[in-house]
Image (cartoon, rainbow, N blue to C red):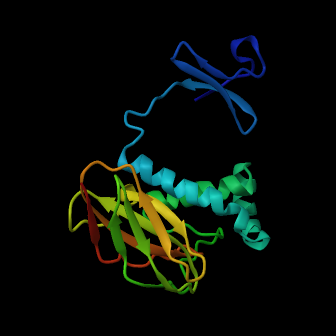
Amino acid sequence: MVRVQAPAMSLDASGSLAGAIVFSKWKGRPYVRELVIPANPKSGGQVGIRAMLRFLSQDWTNISSADKSTWSDLAKAAVISNFNAYIGKNVYRWRDFLGPSKTASCAESGTSPTLGTLTAVAGVRSITVTQPITTAADGWGICFFRSPTATFTGTFDKLKYVGKISGTNDVAFVDSPLAPGTYYYEVLSVTTSGKKSSLSSEVNATVS
């Protein structure tokens, strides 16, 4: 990335040029970089990160003001908003297969929820995976992992969906569209401070 003062004869240029370079700004500073197109935007890692990013961004509005304020020091140090600090640190944590946290301390504490029996039911080009919640405790989210093969271990790049825990309501994931075949699922829970539970037993369903 190259910082510039007046790219393309403009103090505020943006966009790509000739499919090769990109003009933009970062923290208010103009820069130019090479245009990079992911080789596989649907790779397991990219899908897993996007699933976690979606969960984090959607739940930010529900986080208390006190918890949001814990991100202030990190945000000021990086000259970004509290929201971006929260997203950035939690995405990096997930890449290392650590649980996301509502607060910047990421203490990995609290009581994990008590989960019922995971089920998977096939439908038309879809499978509905349902995780009953017996007691919510300090649970924040349920992470759903999928594999085309049995006896797998859920990892960050096998994540397909993160559902929010809301009391003792079931947390469900509709996996669609799916090609015919058998799919295998596991889940784990995360607390509001980033503590992960162990992975659940594996379930499967077959789409014909």
Q: Is 85 on the left or on the right of 157, as rendered?
A: right
x, y percentage for residue 1?
57, 29
Q: Is 193 on the left or on the right of 203, as rendered?
A: right
Q: Is 25 on the left or on the right of 53, as rendered?
A: right
Name the residue: 45% across, 64% down: 173
Choose between 188 and 4: the one closer to the eye. 188
Q: Quadrant of the C terminus?
A: bottom left
Q: Is 21 on the left or on the right of 71, as rendered?
A: left
Name the residue: 50% across, 72% down: 171
Choose between 3 and 66: the one closer to the eye. 66
Choose between 100 and 31: the one closer to the eye. 100
Q: Quadrant of residue 8?
A: top right
x, y percentage for residue 202?
28, 73
x, y percentage for residue 178?
33, 50
Q: Quadrant of residue 77?
A: bottom right
Residue 98 visible in this rendered orientation of the protein: no
Residue 40, placed above or below residue 68: above
**Residue extending furthest front?**
124
Name the residue: 27% across, 65% down: 205
x, y percentage for residue 170?
50, 76
Name the residue: 51% across, 17% down: 20
Residue 9, placed above or below residue 179: above
